[in-house]
Image (cartoon, rainbow, N blue to C red):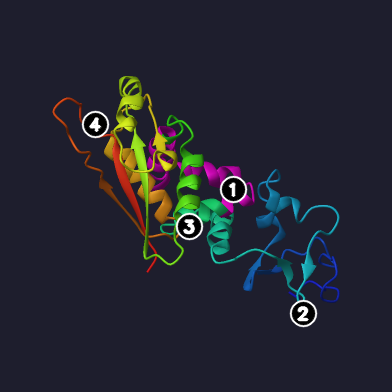
């Protein structure tokens, strides 16, 4: 069986015979051979839309239809489309591809795997109950980078208030803080089972997932005879070198 006849490189084009079952793909430099039926298996997906109707893809110098996206995990997407097989590794990365191409059956199946179920149903649902969590992570990174000039580490103070009762003591607690009160980043309170340590683990995990090296240490406040001691504060330390 001959391969589809492609037009010259750089032009929008499709196989000369749109009914030919074989399609040669170049996905970010990774080459794949598959069929139109496979690519169109889920008609409401973004991937299927690329191969229906008017041509939407350019070709490379060899005539392969070109998708300008990292193709490292596209093979796993194709395997699912061919035979329903789920990947056994790189689940997070394949999930991102499934979301990008809007392949809903693959998205659903991956979300049911142990690797994603705990993240989506457990951790992310918890973090959605922590006020301004994502914004606080970005603030922490921004402050740390601003303080990194001519320094090996950046230290930011964070305050974790687990309950509404803790929140009620916030003003008293921060008034006794010797560190710069203006730069303290506060998390909580939240209505969910996870503990303060669980929240701290999430902060560390999400910052390190962006490529930073961080550690978290309790901040010990000086305790006087007349004042109460609070354990709401922690030092978040970014290590640059």
Secondary structure of the magenta portion, mostly? helix
58 or 20, nearer to the observer: 58
Alpha-carbon span between mark 4 and mark 2: 66 Å
Q: Which residues are magenta?
A: 97-126
Circle 4 sits in a helix, a strand or a loop, which is it? Answer: loop
> Who comes first in sequence, dot 1 or dot 4?
1
Q: Which residue is mark 3?
A: 145
Above or below, 31 against 91 in this view is below
Q: Which residue is mark 4?
A: 230
Q: Is residue 221 left or right of residue 209?
A: left
The reply to whether dot 1 and dot 2 touch (C-beta < 8 Å) is: no
Alpha-carbon span between mark 3 and mark 1: 31 Å
> Who comes first in sequence, dot 4 or dot 2?
2
117 or 88, nearer to the observer: 117
Residue at 37% x, 69% y is 241
Above or below, 216 against 177 in this view is below
Is label 1 or label 4 in front? 4
Q: Which residue is mark 1?
A: 99
**Neighbourhood count class around disc 1 (C-alpha, 10 Å): few under 14, some 14–19, many 20 upward:** some
Magenta residue check for 121: yes
Q: Position of residue 51 (x, y in %)?
A: 76, 56
Q: Which residue is mark 2?
A: 61
Is label 4 or label 2 in front? 4
The reply to whether dot 4 and dot 2 touch (C-beta < 8 Å) is: no
The reply to whether dot 4 and dot 3 touch (C-beta < 8 Å) is: no
The reply to whether dot 1 and dot 4 touch (C-beta < 8 Å) is: no
Total numbered labels = 4
Magenta residue check for 145: no
């Amino acid at each position: 069986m001959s391969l589809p006849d492609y037009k010259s490189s750089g032009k929008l084009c499709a196989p000369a015979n749109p009914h030919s079952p074989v399609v040669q793909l170049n996905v970010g430099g990774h080459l794949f051979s598959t069929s139109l039926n496979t690519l169109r298996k889920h008609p409401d997906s973004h991937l299927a839309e690329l191969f229906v109707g008017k041509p939407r893809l350019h070709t490379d110098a060899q005539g392969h239809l070109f998708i300008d996206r990292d193709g490292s995990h596209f093979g796993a997407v194709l395997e699912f489309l061919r035979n329903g097989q789920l990947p056994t590794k790189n689940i997070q990365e394949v999930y991102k591809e499934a979301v990008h191409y809007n392949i809903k059956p693959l998205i659903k199946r991956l979300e049911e795997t142990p690797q994603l179920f705990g993240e989506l149903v457990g951790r992310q649902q918890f973090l959605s109950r922590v006020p301004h969590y994502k914004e606080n992570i970005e603030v922490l990174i921004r402050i740390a980078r601003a303080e990194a000039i001519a320094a090996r580490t950046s230290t930011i103070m964070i305050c974790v208030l687990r309950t509404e009762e803790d929140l009620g003591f916030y003003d008293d607690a921060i008034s006794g803080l010797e560190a710069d009160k203006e730069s303290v980043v506060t998390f909580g309170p939240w209505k969910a089972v996870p503990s303060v340590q669980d929240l701290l683990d999430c902060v560390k995990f999400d910052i390190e997932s962006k490529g930073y090296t961080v550690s978290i240490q309790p901040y010990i406040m000086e305790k006087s005879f007349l004042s109460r001691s609070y354990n709401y504060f922690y030092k978040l330390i970014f290590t640059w070198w």
